[in-house]
Amino acid sequence: MSVTPGGLATTTLTVRNDSDIVEAYGLEVVGDCAAWATVEPARVSLYPGTSETVTIRLEPPRSPEVRAGEVPLAVRVLPTEHPEAVRVPESTVRVEEFRELRAEIAPRRRRGWLRGRYRLALRNEGNTPVTLGFTPAQPGEELRFTLKPAEQTLEPGESAEVGLRARIGKPVWFGAPVIWPFTVTVAETAAPDAPLPEPADAIRTSLDAEFVQIPVFPKWLLAVLAALIALLLAWFTLVRPAVRSAAKEAADEVVQQRPTPGGSEQAGQGTGAGGGQPGAGTGGAGSRPGTGGGAGTGTGTGDGGGGGLAGGGGGGQSSATIDVQTGGGAEKTGTYTVPADKVFQVTDIVVANFQGDEGVLTINFGDRKITTIALETFRNQDYHWVTPIRIAANDTVTAQVTCAKPGTPATGRRAQECHEVLNVSGVLSDIR
């Protein structure tokens, strides 16, 4: 006899009492069919020489756990008065095949400049092994597809994932994003040394997805460039001529006020107090306030000495770059040390995770932890401070990288190591 999972089949069993007493018999299905087979009634009482026929109901669930093929069916008949006379008649049940596949594509929409990556999630919900093939298609055939693997064999109840990459040949430089819809047909193919199933039973399903090709230069960037160009034009046409005119007028005024040589208002000419004795010189009538200086008489009008950082040497803008490379599952620290006679006042840091690595980055200034960042949350990150962070001489700037998983750079091939770059900038000055 045969039965289809999710359906019902019945058969009968006749029990005869050949003893010379009234006997009761308990009936129970045993073996592989026991989970989905029952006997009705499960107990009969018979007079000597009489018999009764019971019904065996077979109701296998529609589940991958009920494999297709022949399954033994056995019923244990246990007499109550003479249990030693137990009997176990046997038969065979053929469980029919059924095919059922659960398939999904994720994500349904992917954005990118030239390519998008997807995954096909598959599960064999039937009760027989299946071999699946995949056929991507897109109207116009502008997209090119790569599948890994190209075929997939699944046992009943088994799950698997298939990688799909969609790629287009030409970028979109400007304008709006372009949407490329496509479908992936999942169909059952013939397994090795096995015939192709009947068309009515074969698996065939279609999955819809989209690749959204974004422009290299988005609209907002064009708007920003237009605004910058407008500001530059306004500067050259309005602001710059006004500034140059004001500077020229100020220079002409200084030239007009300068005394002529040989006149009574010679610059820097004067005598000390007390009739030509050495002393603090005073300028002539044309001298500027605060000019002149030095012992005795003088002919100069020099200003005070040049300035610098108060109490110490000068300082200037400086930056340091820390480059850290480490393998997956490893930890490595990159270090920059402030020179012994300097102090570093940090105002900006920039962190680059250009490969899209996964892991943790910790930044320290000396003994102070500045921040800890999960690498998978960013590609480029920058921080700025209005009040500089001061790092003393001989202190260090450290970038500690714990690599969980190297990422995939723009080349499309996964990197062998995590690679992070930290740039620290600010004012490097002499110790005060």
Image (spheres, rainbow, N blue to C red):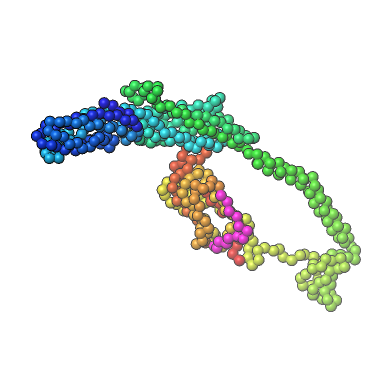
Q: To which quarter of the image does residue 312 belong?
A: bottom right
- Main SS of residues in magenta: strand
- Hey, which residue is sitting farthest bottom in the picture? 274
What residue is drawn where x is 57% and y is 62%?
Answer: 390
Magenta part of the chain = 381-393
- Please tell me whether residue 137 is drawn above or below residue 157 in the rendered image: above
What residue is drawn where x is 42% and y is 49%?
Answer: 330
Total marks drawn?
Answer: 0
Q: Is residue 426 left or right of residue 70?
A: right
384 in magenta: yes
Q: Is residue 197 left or right of residue 381?
A: left
- Please tell me whether residue 244 is drawn above or below residue 66 in the rendered image: below
Task: Report x, y in % for residue 247.
Answer: 81, 53
- Of residue 184 and residue 125, the one placed in the foreground of this image is 125
Q: To which quarter of the image does residue 263 belong?
A: bottom right
- Of residue 345 and residue 255, the one placed in the foreground of this image is 345
- Please tell me whether residue 136 is drawn above or below residue 282 in the rendered image: above
Task: Report x, y in % for residue 35.
Answer: 27, 37
